[in-house]
Amino acid sequence: MHWLTRLSIRLTTKPIGADEFGNRYYESKKPRSHGRKSRYVIFNGKAEASKVPADWHGWLHHTESSPPPADGYAKHSWQLPHQPNLTGTIHAYRPAGHLLRLGKRRKATGDYQPWKPE
């Protein structure tokens, strides 16, 4: 992020909180022309929108009026921990046979029947 952008955010906003990834959230001190205060995030590391957890996403997009509690919302047993989009990283999913995985694809099973127009 450009140093001038960081300076502008720090001068015109107030800090609201941070998430478990180290992203910091801010809200403008004054409402904008439409009556709502702007909300900002300064990412810890590379700016990637998928790094914003669901708890903070709701607040950031004005779905929630107040930021999430410091310990987060109660989680259900079926919920997994938040994970940013890994596309384009070394941790991205690569199926068997992918060139970067250096594996071999399984042979076709023979159940494929091509469409033949009449």
Image: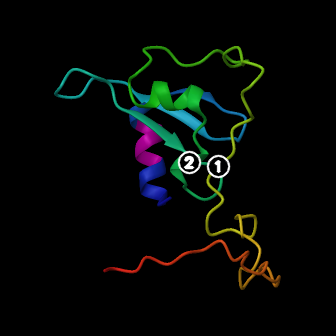
Q: Which residues are magenta?
A: 7-11
In the visual, does 116 lie left or right of 101?
A: left
Nearer-the-camera pick, 110 or 38:
110
**SS label for mark 2:** helix
Residue 97 visible? The answer is yes
Which of the two discs, 1 and 2, labels the residue nearer the N terminus? 2
Residue that badge 2 annotates: 50
Residue beneath the point at 69% across and 77% down? 110
**SS label for mark 1:** loop
In the visual, does 91 lie left or right of 87?
A: right
Residue beneath the point at 47% across and 61% down? 2
Q: Are marks 1 and 2 in contact (CB under 8 Å)?
A: yes
For the stretch drawn in magenta, the main secondary structure is: helix
Residue 14 visible? The answer is no
In the visual, does 23 lie left or right of 109?
A: left
Residue beneath the point at 55% across and 54% down? 48
Please, which residue is most extreme toward the front here? 118
Question: Is the C terminus in the top left, top right, bottom left or bottom right quadrant?
Answer: bottom left
Disc 1 crowd rating (10 Å Cα; few below 14, some 14-19, many 20+) is few
Q: Is residue 94 above or below residue 74?
A: below
Residue that badge 1 annotates: 84
The dot on residue 110 is: none
Residue type, numbered disc 2: Ser
Q: Is residue 16 above or below residue 110?
A: above
In the visual, does 58 lie left or right of 82?
A: left
Residue 13 image point, x, y percent: 43, 31
Q: Is residue 8 above or below residue 104?
A: above
